[in-house]
């Protein structure tokens, strides 16, 4: 494909080059729904960025005012509930989309191409999104988020070696103070966005240079534009409809304001942290915490574990299916358990 | 004077290696400084005695809670004297409350339970509640705290 075009490119105008790029061939299997999940987070990210920026025009990152400013957004500001609702619903869809994408990549072992680099970047993206989830949740500064923030930062503290310094950096001291809120706010609105944009860029560049996932059944290709572009547009419209409706059906709510002297009666975290939360309640402490850290570490370096085993002749497709099932069942059980108690 | 080794590959490698090393050291030093700037100062503050109240006002069943200079304290009568515990749960930092019916401290976050002597008896907490020193002078009860 490239050889015929390389010479001609020099004389082309900017628009012609752009057009060429849009016409680039992409594999046919990306037409299938389960393979579009990579683009979905990108669309969701744009929605989050826009609503997030809008929210910063009203939010006040100071303990005495944070809760009230969100209350004002939710209850008084014109369409405030809607912007906050869209932001909140979209985060949930984002985590869901990433989970599905991760499951798909894991089951099909798509992480193998490119020496695991795509997976590493993807894992980085996933952790960044979770960090967004945690910091955003803390900014609400109601009592549940206050105590959630206490517990999570303390959990980070238990990580061997790096835990203590990260803990102090996050809290800005031993205790939760106005510095803590300010730091989480800075992370949520400045450092994490910077990080995620870099990671998204690197993830996309890695895909463009290392190639899309190859699957054996579908060999054909089609141009990115119009076919795939229109498909993405359709996805965007569909997502917007879903998000707007969900935000209307489940408008954002607020709990009691943060109270450093009274622990919230129910400190359960958002659904994507439920399984871990339930697990550290029922498991013995050290084992519980250690298994959480170990799980995330193994998850991150999985392509290299896979390579180690498949070099020794293991049938990793079966292994992955088994691991995937076990992890999924475990997480589902813990999440449902947490929802029931 | 003769050139010992004039291999261009080697030169390129060496200069590349030096550049990388320099860059790493430079950025590393700067990064360390930035981290130092962000790192809070947690060196021990000087300890001072703070008056809690009169002994007869403070005595009674169960734990009494105080919030002194940001420290959450549970005071407990034990025989003639008093013991002061930090209410911060040793598991992941929630606050314990006093459960009078069962004569124990309870942490709602992950169901940690401590007995009236602060000993962890059930749930995830790995060690007993921290204690503060209590001093009695005449009728007055003081607590020793590290405050700024
Ligand atoms: S923080 Fe008290 S039991 Fe977990």
Image (spheres, coloured by chain):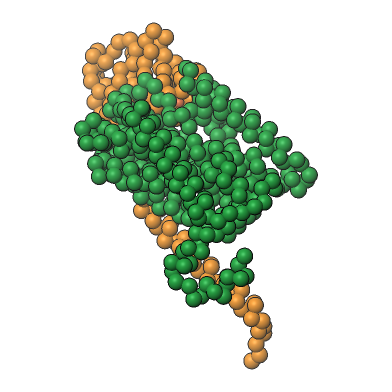
Q: Residue at x 66, y 44 (%)?
A: A109
**Of the pair A311 and A113, the residue shown nearer to us:** A113
Q: Is residue A152 left or right of residue A311?
A: left
Q: Is residue A54 left or right of residue A227?
A: left
Q: Colour of chain B?
A: orange
The answer to whether any part of residue A255 appears in the image is yes
The answer to whether any part of residue A301 appears in the image is no
Quarter of the picture holding the C terminus of chain B: top left
Task: Give percent across and percent down for residue B2.
Answer: 66, 90
Q: Is residue A227 left or right of residue B30?
A: right
Quadrant location, ligand no. 1: top left
- Most extreme residue toward the bottom is B1
**Of the pair A152 and A324, the residue shown nearer to us:** A324
Q: Residue at x 31, y 25 (%)?
A: A255
Q: Residue at x 60, y 43 (%)?
A: A105
Task: Give percent across and percent down for residue B107.
Answer: 41, 21
Task: Give percent across and percent down for residue A219.
Answer: 67, 51
The quadrant holding residue B31 is bottom left
A167 relative to B10, above or below: above
The quadrant holding residue A144 is top left
Q: Colour of chain A?
A: green
């Amino acid at each position: 494909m490239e050889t015929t075009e390389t010479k001609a490119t020099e004389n082309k105008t900017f628009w012609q080059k752009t057009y060429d790029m849009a016409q680039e061939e992409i594999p046919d299997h990306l037409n299938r729904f389960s393979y579009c999940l990579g683009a979905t987070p990108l669309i969701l990210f744009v929605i989050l960025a826009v609503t997030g920026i809008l929210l910063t025009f009203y939010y006040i990152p100071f303990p005495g005012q944070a809760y009230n400013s969100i209350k004002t957004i939710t209850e008084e500001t014109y369409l405030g509930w809607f912007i906050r609702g869209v932001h909140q619903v979209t985060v949930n869809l984002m985590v869901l989309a990433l989970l599905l994408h991760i499951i798909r990549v894991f089951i099909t072992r798509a992480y193998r191409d490119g020496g695991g680099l795509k997976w590493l970047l993807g894992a980085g993206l996933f952790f960044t999104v979770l960090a967004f989830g945690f910091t955003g949740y803390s900014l609400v500064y109601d009592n549940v988020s206050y105590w959630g923030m206490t517990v999570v930062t303390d959990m980070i503290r238990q990580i061997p070696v790096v835990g203590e310094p990260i803990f102090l950096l996050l809290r800005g001291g031993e205790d939760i103070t106005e510095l803590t809120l300010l730091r989480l706010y800075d992370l949520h609105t400045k450092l994490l966005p910077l990080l995620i944009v870099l990671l998204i860029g690197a993830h996309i560049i890695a895909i463009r240079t290392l190639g899309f996932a190859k699957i054996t059944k579908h060999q054909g290709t089609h141009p990115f534009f119009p076919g795939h572009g229109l498909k993405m547009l359709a996805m965007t419209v569909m997502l917007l409809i879903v998000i707007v409706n969900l935000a209307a059906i489940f408008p954002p709510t607020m709990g009691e304001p943060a109270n450093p002297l009274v622990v919230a009666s129910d400190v359960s975290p958002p659904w994507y942290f439920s399984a871990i939360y339930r697990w550290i309640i029922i498991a013995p402490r050290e084992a519980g915490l250690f298994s959480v850290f170990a799980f995330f570490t193994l998850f991150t370096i999985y392509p290299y574990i896979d390579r180690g085993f498949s070099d020794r002749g293991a049938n990793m497709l079966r292994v992955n299916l088994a691991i995937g099932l076990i992890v999924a069942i475990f997480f589902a059980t813990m999440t449902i358990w947490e929802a029931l108690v | 004077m003769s050139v010992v080794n004039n291999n261009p590959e080697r030169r390129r490698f060496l200069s590349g290696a030096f550049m990388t090393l320099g860059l790493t050291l430079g950025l590393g030093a700067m990064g360390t400084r930035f981290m130092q700037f962000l790192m809070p100062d947690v060196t021990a503050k000087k300890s001072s005695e703070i008056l809690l109240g009169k002994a007869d006002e403070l005595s009674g069943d169960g734990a009494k809670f105080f919030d002194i200079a940001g420290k959450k304290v549970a005071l407990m009568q034990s025989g003639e004297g008093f013991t002061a515990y930090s209410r911060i749960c040793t598991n992941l930092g929630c606050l314990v409350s006093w459960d009078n019916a069962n004569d124990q401290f309870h942490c709602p976050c992950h169901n940690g339970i401590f007995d009236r002597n602060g000993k962890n008896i059930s749930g995830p907490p790995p060690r007993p509640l921290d204690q503060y020193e209590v001093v009695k002078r005449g009728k007055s009860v003081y607590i020793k705290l590290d405050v700024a």
